[in-house]
């Protein structure tokens, strides 16, 4: 089912959480709503689910106006950050809940419910824990139960609110991979909210970057990472070095009136022993040598820089703390300093 | 219920005791223990023992005779009736008030929370007087009630009203913190899964609060059966009609029928003991449920 939101506005007291957002979620895609906490992403997700009412705007599910449709009738599956499992029910009963509360005319027989629930538990690899209670499960297992429970009612849309937010890093990575596989099998239109850029980049077909109730950029993970549309996206996704300078003859020159800001990723900053035109002088402060990439922290005149380079390159430069070197951007993106205008 | 915090406290105590640095001297410990035990024995245990001793002083026959005497039976019946009406009413009011306070945001919420505590802060006698002023013969609705031949004051309805008033906070007070702690996520999850409000309430909310609710009911029941002040004002002390057990005890005592007075009192004391046992059992169950959630 495709989802379309038009001019959604939502305020809480005096605080505007969403400023007239319009967005399309195409059928079968996995979309991430990415942004810092308080940017309105969870509010948007809850409005789509029907758990929250927008002050203005329209929600279209499969082209049909669903703005005033009750949550119960929207056919959405919702996965909560803290699982929201029914604590007094076994895993089996949790998953069966959505099937048991259907009106009698639509309810399946007990045998069919059992078959369906066990199939779902098999899918989330928890069939052997069917009789356990939520309190007896680990965080990752609980989240998988929550997912099976949401899928039991065969929703047209799956909405996940920070689904891995409460889990530790290792479990989070495993679940992420597993959720992607599941999505590739089921092809159900899914939206998940996250503040974790790595999660969004790795899991989503499409990323919607949000900030302060507005959309900053929409695109594939590669588009938003390699071609950030605004300074916010640049600094929110990955690390970046920021140079102050001016544009002259279509070229960026560091220093000057500083009417422009240049954003450079750590791997796009070259370290040289000899300075060239427009090279930036800096001193090596620390060198981190673990992993495939070396990370180098440098101190400039009144700011610090971060550079990444392959181990071999660092070795050939023989970089050590205290060395005076020069920095040269391989690629940079320039924005006007006083606004989000995209210059180059 | 303080299940979680009491367990935490226990762990803290053990550690506190085990450490040389924080352990108090045996003398201090001894004094504190003796003080509280003596107080407990003199002010709590002794009166309880006296009640049963006095009740049985003249033997079983007198004891039983005092209980099966018609006025006593009628008092027991009225007390049970009042409790049977007051407890369910309080469950309904208490659950709805707690639900409204814990799960919704609305204007006047703070006022409602304060109002719920009113019966705790007002003397029960004053509560009874208020009912007399409103429903009594000289009260606001007195003439209308008389014209329609409805008796509230000096009749069973007045006793029920007074009982409901004094017991009102128990269920709500017990449930509000519990429901606030549980939040609304499970209810939201149930709704998204297609459950109606009714289904959500019975299948999700009630099972989650059942031990807190039981606890509230036990306290309500104990207070409903034992209430004296408010009931005394509205009852009129008509023997065999508007006397509850506590009122009956007082009348017997004033008439120097000590054995009979203590016999009826022993029933109330017995009720208190049963209530305590039930309360301990429910707390134990709730703590187990709590442990399961945390485990």
Image (cartoon, coloured by chain):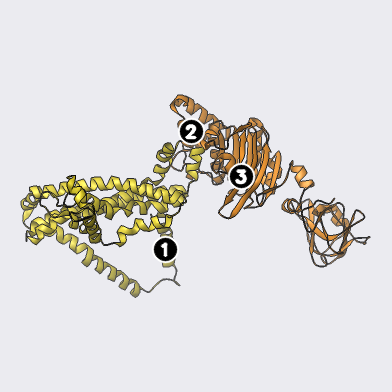
Task: Residue at 53%, 37% (x, y): give it.
Answer: A71
Question: Residue A47 appears at what percent x and percent y?
Answer: 58, 42
Find residue A67 and report its image quarter.
top right
Q: Is residue B64 visible?
A: yes
Left/right placement of residue B211 relative to residue A138 reads left
Q: Which chain is orange?
A: A
Which hue belongs to chain B? Answer: yellow
**Mark 1 nearby-residue class (10 Å; few <14, some 14–19, many ≥20):** few
Foreground disc of the pair 3, 1: 3
The earlier-in-sequence mark between 2 and 3 is 3
* Quadrant showing the N terminus of chain B: bottom left
- Foreground of the two, A251 or A239: A251
Chain letter of the residue beneath label 2 in the structure image: A
Q: Is residue A178 visible?
A: no
Q: Are marks 2 and 1 in contact (CB under 8 Å)?
A: no
**Mark 2 nearby-residue class (10 Å; few <14, some 14–19, many ≥20):** many
Residue labelled with disc 2: A96
Residue labelled with disc 1: B14
Residue labelled with disc 3: A44
Foreground disc of the pair 2, 3: 3
Marks 3 and 1, how far apart in space? 49 Å
Under circle 1, the secondary element is helix
Chain letter of the residue beneath label 3 in the structure image: A
């Amino acid at each position: 089912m495709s989802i379309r939101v038009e001019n959604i506005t939502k305020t809480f007291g005096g605080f505007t959480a969403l400023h007239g957002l319009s967005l399309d979620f195409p059928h079968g895609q996995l979309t991430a709503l990415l942004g810092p906490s308080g940017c309105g992403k969870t509010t948007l997700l809850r409005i789509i689910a029907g758990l929250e009412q927008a002050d203005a705007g329209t929600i279209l599910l499969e082209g049909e106006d669903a703005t005033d449709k009750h949550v119960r009738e929207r056919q959405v599956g919702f996965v909560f950050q803290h699982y929201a499992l029914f604590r007094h029910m076994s895993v089996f009963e949790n998953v069966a809940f959505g099937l048991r509360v259907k009106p009698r005319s639509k309810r399946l027989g007990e045998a069919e419910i059992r078959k369906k629930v066990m199939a779902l538990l098999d899918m989330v690899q928890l069939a052997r824990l069917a009789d356990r209670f939520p309190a007896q499960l680990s965080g990752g297992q609980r989240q998988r139960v929550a997912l099976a429970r949401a899928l039991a009612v065969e929703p047209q849309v799956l909405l996940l609110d920070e689904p891995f937010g409460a889990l530790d890093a290792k479990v989070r990575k495993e679940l992420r991979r597993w959720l992607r596989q599941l999505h590739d099998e089921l092809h159900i239109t899914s939206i998940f909210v996250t503040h974790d850029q790595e999660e969004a980049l790795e899991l989503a077909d499409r990323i919607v970057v949000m900030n302060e109730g507005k959309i900053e950029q929409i695109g594939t993970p590669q588009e938003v990472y390699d071609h950030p549309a605004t300074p916010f996206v640049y600094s929110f996704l990955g690390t970046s070095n920021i140079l102050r300078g001016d544009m002259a003859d279509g070229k960026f020159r560091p220093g000057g009136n500083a009417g422009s800001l240049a954003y450079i990723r750590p791997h796009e900053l070259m370290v040289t022993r000899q300075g060239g035109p427009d090279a930036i002088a800096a001193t090596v402060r620390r060198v981190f040598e673990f992993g495939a990439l070396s990370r180098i922290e440098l101190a400039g005149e009144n700011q610090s820089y971060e550079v990444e380079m392959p181990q071999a390159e660092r070795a050939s430069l023989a970089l050590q703390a205290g060395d005076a070197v020069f920095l040269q951007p391989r690629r940079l993106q320039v924005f006007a300093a006083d606004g989000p205008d995209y210059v180059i | 219920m303080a299940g979680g915090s009491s367990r935490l406290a226990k762990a803290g105590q053990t550690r506190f005791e085990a450490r040389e640095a924080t352990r108090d001297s045996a003398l201090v410990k001894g004094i504190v223990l003796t003080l509280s035990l003596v107080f407990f024995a003199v002010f709590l245990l002794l009166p309880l023992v006296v009640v049963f001793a006095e009740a049985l002083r003249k033997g079983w026959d007198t004891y039983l005779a005092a209980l099966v005497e018609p006025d006593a039976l009628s008092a027991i019946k009225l007390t049970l009736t009042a409790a049977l009406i007051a407890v369910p009413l309080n469950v309904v009011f208490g659950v709805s008030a707690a639900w409204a306070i814990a799960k919704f945001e609305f204007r006047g919420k703070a006022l409602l929370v304060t109002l719920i505590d009113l019966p705790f802060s007002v003397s029960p006698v004053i509560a009874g007087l208020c009912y007399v002023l409103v429903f009594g013969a000289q009260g606001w609705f007195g003439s209308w009630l008389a014209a329609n031949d409805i008796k509230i004051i000096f009749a069973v309805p007045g006793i029920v009203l007074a009982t409901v008033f004094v017991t009102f906070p128990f269920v709500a007070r017990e449930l509000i913190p519990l429901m606030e702690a549980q939040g609304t996520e499970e209810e939201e999850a149930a709704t998204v899964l297609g459950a109606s409000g009714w289904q959500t309430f019975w299948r999700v909310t009630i099972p989650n609060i059942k031990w807190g609710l039981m606890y509230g009911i036990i306290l309500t029941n104990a207070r409903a059966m034992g209430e004296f002040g408010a009931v005394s004002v509205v009852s009129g002390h008509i023997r065999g009609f508007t006397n509850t057990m506590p009122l009956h005890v007082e009348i017997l005592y004033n008439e120097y029928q000590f054995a009979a007075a203590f016999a009826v009192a022993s029933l109330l004391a017995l009720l208190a003991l049963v209530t305590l046992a039930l309360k301990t059992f429910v707390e134990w169950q709730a703590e187990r449920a709590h442990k399961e959630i945390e485990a």
